[in-house]
Image (tube, rainbow, N blue to C red):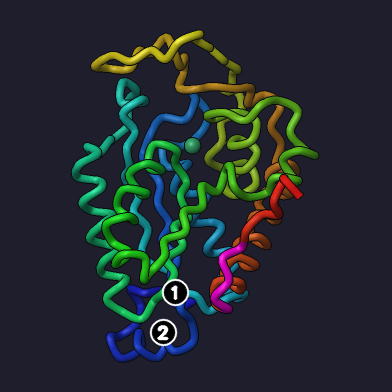
Amino acid sequence: MPLWQELTHIGLLKAIEKTNVAVLPTGALEAHGNHLPLGTDNILPKYLVDAINDRTSALVLPPINYGDSWIFNEFEGTITVEPSALVAFYTNVMKGVFKHSIRYLLVLNGHGGNSGHLETAAKDATNKGERIVIIVNWWRDLSESARAIVLETPEGHAAEDETSEVMHVAPYLVDMENATKARVRTKFRVVSGTYRRELIPRATFGDPTRASKEKGKLIMEQACDEIVELVNQLEKGNIPYLPSEEN
Ligand SMILES: [Zn+2]
């Protein structure tokens, strides 16, 4: 996968002759339990694009490593970007990609708070449907069967799934001695000017104590295979649809 920022402007034109797909990793800088790094939502998508480097010729854009982390803004280390600024930024980057004959922009998104803003930007940037943005919320859209097999507890934030993934990708960044479970649920949606810390104690929602690097390995390997398959399909002009449940 050629890296957009390492090519010359002439080299970029040559690279685009071989593919009509660009990949944009997006993430966030936010608290992830007492045991995972602030950049968890950046580290995992970066690992995925690095891991499939020699398996596709799609172009990789520099990642956008800040996102909408308003919910975790009460925790130290979280840096959040206002939605209006984030949407404008995403829109500008997408339009910059679509100046070229790139037909599909695959956004490999690592953070839930970005999803709606990416959709808003994509509506504006896709030239009335002539171009297409595919948003892959990777922790939800990929590795479904691996997750079903290996996970013993529900997915969450800094939970068993995400902790296992970071244990596989960057074990030296995981502090399992400080991993504790928390799962505060409310019957109704609670919203205030600042999101309340007691609703997400220790920036955790789920049970990281059940995590293991073996579980993370299986999830990440399946995610890599699915991204490569998606890029291959897009390069052929196919948008992969799921089989209809009505038939
Ligand atoms: Zn996360």
Q: Position of residue 192 (x, y in %)?
A: 28, 14
Q: Secondary structure at mark 2?
A: helix
Residue carrying label 1: 59
Query: In the image, residue 199 lies at what x, y percent?
Result: 44, 12
Q: Position of residue 45 (x, y in %)?
A: 50, 53
Q: Which residue is mark 2?
A: 16
218 magenta-colored: no
Residue at 41%, 74% (x, y): give it: 103
Nearest the eye: 196 or 7:
196
Residue segment shown in magenta = 236-240
Q: Quadrant of residue 128?
A: bottom left
Q: Is residue 187 left or right of residue 86?
A: right
Q: Residues within 10 Å of mark 1 (few under 14, many from 20)?
A: many
Q: Nearer the viewer, residue 35 or 107?
A: 107
Q: Quadrant of residue 97?
A: bottom left
Q: Amino acid at mark 1?
A: Leu
Give the residue type that dot 2 points to.
Answer: Ile
Placement of 166 over or under 188, stated as above or below: below
* CB-based contact (under 8 Å), mark 1 and mark 2: yes
**In the image, 149: left or right of 188?**
right
Q: CA distance from mark 1 to mark 2?
A: 8 Å
Q: Main secondary structure of the magenta part?
A: loop
Residue 227 coordinates in the image, percent (x, y) = 60, 62
Residue drawn at x 42%, y 61% as measured from the top left = 133
Question: In the image, is residue 237 part of the stretch drawn in magenta?
Answer: yes
- Assign a secondary structure to mark 1: strand
Front position in the image: 168 or 3: 3
